[in-house]
Amino acid sequence: MSQTKSIAAYENLRARTRELSLIDATAALLNWDEDTYMPRQALPFRAEQVAFFSGWSHRQFTAPEVGDWIKACEDYGFASDSDEAANVREWRRSYDRATKLPSELVEEFNRATTLARDAWTDARKRSEFPLFQPHLEKLIALNRQMADKWGYQECRYDALLDGHERGARASQLKTLFAEFRPALVSVLTPAVERSRSVSESFLEADYPIAAQQAFNREVAAAIGFDFEAGRIDTTTHPFCTSLGPRDTRLTTRYNERDFTESFYGVLHEAGHGLYDQGLKPEHYGTPLGNACSMGIHESQSRLWENHVGRSVAFWQHWHPRACHHFPGLSKFSPDQIVRAINRVAPSFIRVEADQVTYDLHIILRFELELKLIEGEVLAANLPAVWNEEFEKMLGLKVPDDARGCLQDIHWSIGAFGYFPTYTLGNLNAAQLMHRAKKDLPQLDAELAKGSYQSLLSWLRAKVHEPGQRFDPQDLMRRATGEPTQSRFHLEYLKQRFVD
């Protein structure tokens, strides 16, 4: 095929996917609105809106001419290291996956998730799993249908996992977690013992929401989040969503007795937001303008939340400003605050878990959602199985569904296969931070002064700007010299909580 026709095919692809990105961003805005400001009675109509947009977008991307354009580009053969080659490769992957699903199934799935998310919110508030159960059963069935149509080699779950972390397999995760879990437990016992002198309510006081909002915004801006291109709102479950190159929305929730709940929620979501704001805007609407994977995305949130935000250096620098917003904190030294926020003790809520037990929460969810998809656990039995496995893993009796199987939003939005990316994110975060400190010898001194630009610039170059140019493991090799390893995270945990 001639160069002229190939370039025309490429430009047609870029125009089509940019147009679809505008539609998808509009649908994402509707979802954000549903979680923040939408009146509840608008839900049925919102479900129809989201279903319409998803179906229309799916039909436009799976149209025969899109396949023709992709093939024309492949036949021409752009240079292997070019932007064009990277985009064509990812368009092919997405097209082959999308064309296996009929538009009706896509619409039904998006309609179901809109209704399920609202039912989950109500069920969680009332701590009544039966209110959510029929929605969960439907979403499991729909996920199975999609997995069967996508195809898989080992198990249905792999087809779902691949949508969040390219190339990952359940069998690999089982092996990883089987090795990782006893190493975590070996850190847990001395870490818990070390934390016994710090009570759970050590920092408990009155923290007005307005003061929390002001402090959260100040710190988020300091680490680099651009509030001219983003904002923070309130929701049941913290999340970050990108509605375009200059529109990144963070959300958090507030506890007026514990400022750390909203603060670390914002730091976590700001890590995601920095990634989204670091993607090159000129690539918007193409794979190079999208994040590499959720395991890489989660590395950014966990890096800023934990490696930066829970360190001694961070609180030595931010202590005066924290005391300005929360005068009651002045009775605590930075070291006391650090000991309190790094207190290790098994607890019920994943998003409030300490860094040592956090991955045990993830392993539990991975094992349960794998069994749900493979039919080894029925949705009706989920609370009982959850409670039993949770007690085995963390030694606590779950008091109610809200602090048990209803605490996370993920299954209500049909995101099966997402949970393992949190642990992959932890591993990647420690590995990236280890390498950043090698590449930037002055980094520790800069962080101690509250200067984050060198770290952010390093992450921009190594992680954000490549978009989907590389698969997750290739990106990690290029950024750190080797694929994802668990040893860096374990070394980090031992240094912070045991040594």
Image (spheres, rainbow, N blue to C red):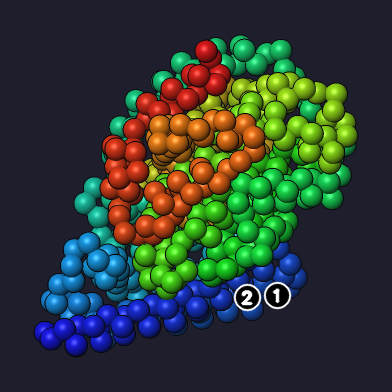
In which quadrant will I find the N terminus?
A: bottom left
- Residue at the image point whose x is 19% and y is 88% from the top: 5
Left of 472 or right of it: where is 396?
A: right
Q: Distance between the residues labelled 1 and 2?
A: 6 Å
Q: Residue 473 carries which label?
A: none
Q: In which quarter of the image is residue 383?
A: top right
Q: Position of residue 173 (x, y in %)?
A: 34, 38
- Residue at the image point whose x is 56% and y is 19% from the top: 497
Mark 1, Cα crowd under 10 Å, few <14 / some 14-19 / many 20+, is few
Q: Closest to the observer: 300 or 382?
A: 300
Q: Position of residue 119 (x, y in %)?
A: 64, 59
Q: Closest to the observer: 217 or 134?
A: 217
In the rendered view, tell whether residue 154 sits above or below residue 91: above
Left of 97 or right of it: where is 189?
A: right
Left of 285 or right of it: where is 409?
A: right
Residues at circles 1 and 2 in contact by the CB criterion of under 8 Å? yes
Mark 2, Cα crowd under 10 Å, few <14 / some 14-19 / many 20+, is many
Q: Where is residue 325 in the image (x, y as percent from the top left)?
A: 84, 41
In the rendered view, tell whether residue 217 sits above or below residue 385: below
Amino acid on which the number 2 mark rests in the picture: Arg
Under tag 2, what secondary structure? helix
Q: In which quarter of the image is residue 58?
A: bottom left
- Residue at the image point whose x is 29% and y is 67% from the top: 83
**Mark 2 = which residue?**
46
Left of 13 or right of it: where is 343?
A: right
- Residue at the image point whose x is 62% and y is 65% from the top: 229
**Mark 1 = which residue?**
42
